[in-house]
Image (cartoon, rainbow, N blue to C red):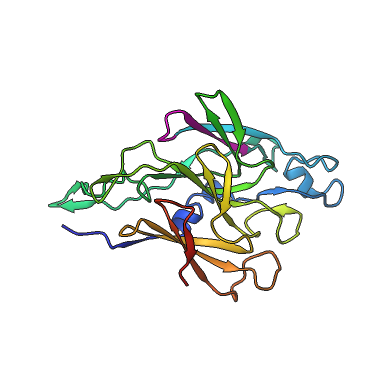
Amino acid sequence: MKHLPTILMLTLACIMASCSDEKDGKHEKGFQVSATSEGSENDQVNGINPDSLKIKTQPGGVLMTGIPNVRLTTVFKVNVNKKDKTTFTGSNDFHYRYEEYAENGEVKKDRANNWNSNLMPGLSAVYGYNMVNISHYDIKENKQKNFFKKPVLVRTLYFPTFSKDTLNYKPVQRNYFIVSVYNDDTNKDGFINLKDLRRLYLFDINGENQKALVPENYSVFKSEYDSDNDFMYVFAKPDTNKNGKQDESEPIHIFWIDLKDPNKTGRLY
């Protein structure tokens, strides 16, 4: 029987970024946040009225979290097809871990570490084309709120999984959310898109923003999982030249997040 390595690589292509963002020829363009020239092509493509700069949104699917009274709804930008002016939205896609133990050609799960194909035990990871917000609903309180006060570009949402995961034979339960997001036009080009700095935020179970898990002058780009310590390692680059985007020449720093209590963080390298 083969054993998984202590640290599982969760690469840019499959975790902090979206594996299927370019399917069907689509690319995450984000959305306009400041006016360009009136009547420009960008205004038409993004469906933006230059005097309001508001975007149309539409709810996606409901996410069944591991907290019975909390349900999340993904919110997507309504996109306009440039050719025929028809509209379309994104939909929920999930990141999965495909490694399973195999014996004599038969796939078997490790009882000590049954993550139910989640990338990290206790956390599901969802993404989607032009996801711009997350709606939080408390069934007991009959209250709804959005994670963000204004539209952002959500790359990955980590939420308590509905499945019963185990780590080292012990049940894993999470009571928080982590969001990888572009939330500001950091490079001042008039758009929030993949060219801006990508941040990482912690939200409590009530959908309240607690803290930035990596300083906001950094741009995150990949992560690794340490199953021995139940740590998430986040790789990020500081915006040393203050141009609001990630550059090849900028140094790489590594931050750790204790997934048992994500308020505990630090810098590893």
Residue at 62%, 48% in the rendered image: 153
Along the viewing direction, whichever of 226 and 195 lies nearer the viewer: 226
Residue at 70%, 35% in the rendered image: 56
Q: Measured along the vertical axis of the image, is residue 196 above or below residue 114?
A: below
Image side of residue 144 versus residue 32, left or right: left
- Magenta range is 65-76
Q: Position of residue 81 (x, y in %)?
A: 67, 40
Q: Position of residue 80 (x, y in %)?
A: 69, 39
Residue at 39%, 51% in the rendered image: 260
Q: How many numbered marks are there? A: 0
The residue furthest left is: 104
Where's the N terminus, which quadrant? bottom left
27 within the magenta span: no
Q: Position of residue 249 (x, y in %)?
A: 60, 76
Residue at 69%, 42% in the rendered image: 150
Q: Quadrant of residue 199?
A: bottom right
Image side of residue 172 versus residue 232, left or right: left
70 within the magenta span: yes
Q: Measured along the vertical axis of the image, is residue 17 above or below residue 135?
A: below
